[in-house]
Image (cartoon, grey):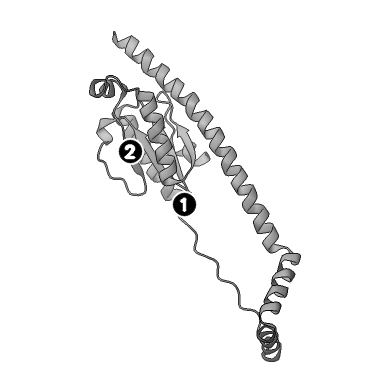
Amino acid sequence: MSEPDDLALARWEVATLTGRLRSLEAERDAAVEERDRHRRQAAALRGSPSYRIGRTLVELTRDPIGLAGRAVRRIRHGRATPPRRRPPAGPAPARVYVAVGLGGPASHALVRALRQRIVVDGDHLPVLVTDQPALRGLQVPGVVLEYLPDPATWRRHDPGADWETMLAGRIAQLCRDHRAAGTVVIDPRDPPTLARLLSN
């Protein structure tokens, strides 16, 4: 197969993978929205007056003397109810960036932009999936790098295996492992700059 044919095949594989990932992302987004809707409903219920009244009644039923005594002591000594401590914020959600087919300089520029992005606004953990050998084994604070061999290397390693299936499975596993809130497929012809990353 000639070099133009290899390039066309790689582009077709990336386009197919992009379609699959968008479909998976839409399903995941729907599930996340449903989960968030339930959380909002639960938070609204906990903040409603009827919930607080019901909770007070339950506490009064369980320990009427103790609840009444605490209320009297607060009134007598002029103490307000101490503010509730908020639980510490959990780790930032992850976002998986799929950068397949990027050259060495473009890959390094993308890693720098992702690093700068989280320094400016650390609202998520970038998980970068790359087939660029120059990034293999690279350690970048705040960025998770996941190296996968390119299609040609993978076919030489395991001729009977489907590279797209392997890539899709690995991305799905990373989304589960890091509880990713989103997936971004990087166009190798137009990798994002720091400004574009900050706008997303």
Q: Which residue is mark 1?
A: 92
Image quarter hosting the N terminus: top left
Q: Residue at 28% across / 24% down in the picture?
A: 154
Question: Relative to 105, does residue 112 appear above or below in the rendering?
Answer: below
Question: Is disc 2 placed on a helix, strand or loop?
Answer: strand
Question: Relative to 141, does residue 30 appear above or below in the rendering?
Answer: above
Quarter holding residue 145: top left
The disc, 2 or 1, on the residue closer to the chain's N-terminal end is 1
Quarter holding residue 192: top left
Q: Residue at 37% across / 38% down in the picture?
A: 128
Q: Label 1: how many residues lie within 10 Å, few (<14), some (14-19) or many (20+)? A: some
Q: Which residue is mark 2?
A: 146
Residue 178 is left or right of residue 146, and the answer is right
Residue 33's disc is: none
Q: Label 2: how many residues lie within 10 Å, few (<14), some (14-19) or many (20+)? A: many
Residue 28 is left or right of residue 170, and the answer is right
* Amino acid type at image mark 2: Glu
Can you give x and y, in whole percent of width and height, for residue 124 in the image? 46, 47
Q: Kindly indicate whether the residue at mark 1 contacts the one at mark 2 (C-beta within 8 angstroms).
A: no
Give the camera-side residue of 195 and 87.
87
Give the camera-side residue of 33 and 125.
33
Residue 145 is left or right of residue 72, and the answer is left
Can you give x and y, in whole percent of width and height, for residue 141 in the image? 33, 49
Can you give x and y, in whole percent of width and height, for residue 200 in the image? 52, 39
* Amino acid type at image mark 1: Ala
Residue 27 is left or right of residue 65, and the answer is left
Q: Residue at 36% across / 45% down in the picture?
A: 143
Q: Residue at 48% across / 26% down in the picture?
A: 20
Question: Is disc 1 placed on a helix, strand or loop?
Answer: loop
